[in-house]
Structure formats: structure tokens, C-alpha cells
Image (spheres, rainbow, N blue to C red):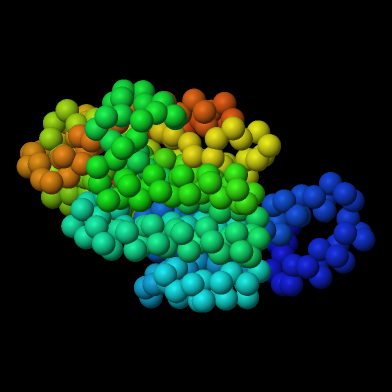
Amino acid sequence: MKLYSGNKKSTLKTRSFRADIQYTQYLEEYVMKRILVTGSYGQIGTELVGALRSKYGGQNVVATGRKDPPEILTKDGPYLHLDVLDVDQLHAILKDNEIDIVIHNASVLSGKGEKNPQLAYRTNIQGSYNVLEAVRILGLDQVFIPSSIAAFGPSTPKENTPNEVIMRPTTAYGVSKVFIELWGEYYAKRYGVDFRSLRYPGIISSEAPPGGGTTDYAVEIFYEALKTQKYTSFLEKGTYLPMMFMDDCIKCTMDLIHADVSKLKHRSFNITAMSFAPEEIAAEIKKYIPQFEMSYKPDFRQQIAESWPATIDDSAAREEWGWKPDYDLAAMTKAMIERLSKKLDIAYQ
Ligand code: AKB
């Protein structure tokens, strides 16, 4: 089907004369939505924009950010410069592009946030406030803002952490994620804003690298295993954290955006696919690169990791919108080695 890319109001009107009701509903629900993604050149944004464009058509997904974009974001859809701290610019872009759904990915991650808490405040709290306000004022259909396992803290139960539980994070990033969840849920209740959020675990991917997180080691390890057959982990042996492969991350994000809102009892969901410690991912990589050697030199991120859950319970996501991951540690490692060796042009056997 040719996806819509022009003036949506007039096209919808013309089509509704011809199409049957179901087809019109389908168009309204899935095809006609125009989506704006902030922080689109980040680890998740880069791949999410591609997936959204394949589903909705390139012109219907506006990628935005503060940097010059990589080619992958400009080749089949628009890219606009946007700083969400500039409220006038934010409102103008949302209006001019007739945006229905905002996916607000721009964020300073945990490690970087500890180095510069004031930057984390501005980007994560002020930026998300501006986005939620814009969605409320302009009456947009939906806003998705990721949360994180970082929203939990040292007093949170560490194993099988429930969806509703004591949070009390001790990092600037974690505090900002709790703000996002609570402010979004407040706007949902008070103003009817359709706010949705996922508490992402560490995300492992082969395209854009993550930047400034505590779970970044689980991506770096693959690059170093392929390039040098060695890696020094900045997290200690035995540090278990919830993790997920990018394909599952894209899947759960798209699934939650499409979920029937009348079936949602929550707005912020735990989400996970696996949990492992550094020595376990190293052992899995050794199956492909037997000469791979791992050493350990924990830094300030060890304390951050220790304040987070080791495993989380995502049964609310499974029950309310059918979440089920496709990748465990073995499947993720296989996919990472295959994709990254191709990308870096390094033979591993
Ligand atoms: C980080 O490590 O800061 C992020 C996260 C778990 O949200 N990857």
C-alpha cells in the first residue's frame, strides 16, 4: 500500500468517501499518524526511526536532534534540527509537521549524568517537561518517553523487581526518570494526555553505539572482542543487570505505542529480556572467539550498577499488551557477532 505523505486532513476526507469504515479506521489508526522522534541519532533513535519509517512511510516520521544527522536518518525521510529546551521551536515544529505522536528519546544517560547532573536536569527533566506540555497544549494523540531500570534504587528489591515498588534512585538520571514517569502519569490523569513509558534495561545493538551509560559495557565488549580479542570491563564480575537486544527494544516500543489504551492499567512498564553478569556474556562470546580474554577494572559505574535491580518482573507488559521477547543471551550474542563482524568487516572464525 502506498503510504500517505501529503496533507493528511484533505486526504482522509477524500478517502473516507471511497473506503469502507474499517479501512478508514485502519488509516486513521496506523497509516495517517505522523510521528516525531527526538534524540533520533542516539543508540535507540537511529534504529527506531528506520523501523517506524518502514511501517509508516519515510515522510510520516520526522527525525530530530541537535547534531548534524548521519545519512541513515536523512535518506528516506525528513530530519530537522530541534532543541527541546527551545519551547517556541518545539511547538512550531510539532504544528508545522502536523505531528500526532511524539517519541521523546533525547536523554543524558546514567554515567554522563553523574559527571554533569545539571546537564541531566536540563535535558531530561526540563526537556521532558517541555515535551509533555507541548503535547498537552497542542492536544496531540500520544507521547512516549522512555524510562529505565535506573528509576529504581538501592532500597528497591533487587530480584524480580515488581512494576509497583519503592523506587528512590540515587543517580541524577534515575531521579529524572522517576520525574518523567510521575509527571507523565499525572498529565494522563489530569489532562487526558496519552503518556506511555517503558523502563528500558541495558540495550545491546550493533548500529549506533550507546553513549554515557552504565550498561554500555555489554556493547563495547563485542567491538573489542572482534577488534582486539580483549576487553576490560568497568563492571565487576557478578554484577547482574537486566538487558535486551535492540530488535526486542524496537518491538516492545512499537507494540506499546500501538497497544489499545483501554486495555492498559499502567502507563510505565517494566520490560526485560535477559539478565547476565560480565563473565557470562564473556563466556558466550568465547564460543565464537575462543581466544577472547576478559579482565576487570571497576570504575564509578560499579556503584551505579549496584543500585539497580538484577532482574525485573515484566508481567504487567506481558498481560496488558502481550509482550514477549525473542532474544535471550545466546541468541543476542549470535546476532551481535554476525552483524558486527559484517559491519566492521572482521572475520571471527
Ligand atoms: C544506562 O546505562 O544509563 C542506560 C539505562 C539502563 O537506562 N543504558
Nearer the observer, 181 or 23: 181
Can residue 310 be seen by looking at this rendering? no
Query: Residue shown at 78%/68% (left/top)?
Result: 9
- Locate residue 254, reporting x and y percent: 55, 46
Q: Looking at the rendering, in which quadrant would you find the C terminus?
A: top left
Can residue 271 be seen by looking at this rendering? yes
- Locate residue 184, reporting x and y percent: 51, 49
Which residue occupies the extreme right position in the image?
17
Q: Is residue 73 above or below residue 180?
A: below
Res 287 → quadrant: top left
Q: Is residue 42 above or below residue 220?
A: below
Q: Is residue 128 above or below residue 241?
A: below
Horizontally, is 267 left or right of 192 in the view?
left
Res 99 → quadrant: bottom right
Q: Is residue 321 above or below residue 84?
A: above
Nearer the observer, 344 or 169: 169
Horizontally, is 136 left or right of 249 in the view?
right
Q: In this figure, what is the number of numbered marks?
A: 0
- Locate residue 339, reporting x and y percent: 35, 48
- Locate residue 26, reporting x and y percent: 76, 50
Query: Residue shown at 36%/23% (left/top)?
Result: 160
Which residue occupies the extreme front position in the image?
190
Query: Residue shown at 18%/49% (left/top)?
Result: 224
Query: Residue shown at 36%/30% (left/top)?
Result: 166
Nearer the observer, 319 or 192: 192
Q: Looking at the rendering, in which quadrant would you find the N terminus?
A: bottom right
Nearer the observer, 70 or 173: 173
